[in-house]
Amino acid sequence: MRRHLLAALLALLAAPALLAQQPAPPNSLLLVAKPSLLDPNFTRTVVLVTQAEDASTVGVILNRPLQKNLQAFLPQDLSGANYKDRVFQGGPVMRRVVISVFRSAAKPQGPAFPVLKGIYLTMHPVNIRALLEDPASQYRLYVGFSGWAPNQLQSEFMRDGWYMLPADAETVFRKDTEGMWEEMIRRATKPKPTT
């Protein structure tokens, strides 16, 4: 199965034109930092990643909740009053920019990356505003994001820094992220049944 996941990731990273033609995603994976990955930006993290049209890889760290209130990151003309969840550290890039992973049955108003069926990742202000203004929206907010230039992530795989797992909505929107990394490590290293 690990070989199939690696093939899936390499296809994901190498074929943006094919992904752009997909009418329905998924266009994502979970990267689980191996215990040997010592980069402080990603130690003990679970990262939801998707591919941009330019073949770069972008995503958000799912298991780094912040203590700061959402309003500390929003422009003054936006209110975070409808948002009841914690804000998460999405990654080391643009650490003050608000990012959202959200559910939507319809195509979002502004640009967004399809992640899973009916789930998108966006930093576009039109989408963020619409989510904040709609108390019925299902979304999670992050500040900053994780990003890799084309071929950068492949080299990290060659250095054996990450496990790969399929992404799923339950993990993406998991309420309590404490222990998530440990759980994903167990899932990634669980012996595969032999036939």
Image: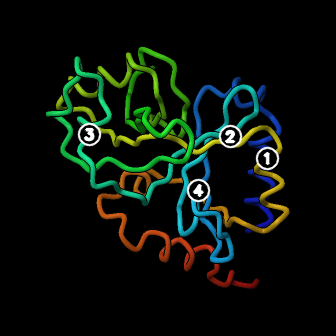
How packed mark 4 is, by other alpha carbons closer than 10 Å (few <14, some 14-19, many 20 or more), is many
Under tag 1, what secondary structure? helix
Count of numbered tags: 4
For the point 57% across and 57% down, the residue is 41
Label 1, on which residue? Answer: 152
Identify the residue at horizontal 74%, vertical 51% (top origin). 9
Q: Which mark is residue 30?
A: 4
**Viewer-nearest of discs 1 and 2:** 1
* Residue 194 at x, y percent in the picture: 74, 85
- Residue 71: x and y, percent? 23, 35
Q: Which is nearer the N-term, disc 1 or disc 2?
A: 2
Spatial CA distance of label 1 from label 2 is: 9 Å
Q: Which residue is mark 3?
A: 70
Between 23 and 150, the one nearer to me in the picture: 150
Q: Quadrant of residue 176?
A: bottom left
Q: CA distance from mark 3 to mark 2?
A: 25 Å
Question: Which mark identifies residue 93?
Answer: none
**Sequence-first disc among 4 and 2:** 4
> Which of the two marks, 3 or 4, is nearer to us in this view?
3
Cβ atoms under marks 1 and 2 closer than 8 Å: yes
Q: Is residue 52 left or right of residue 105?
A: right
Asked if 24 appears above or below 12 in the picture, the reply is above
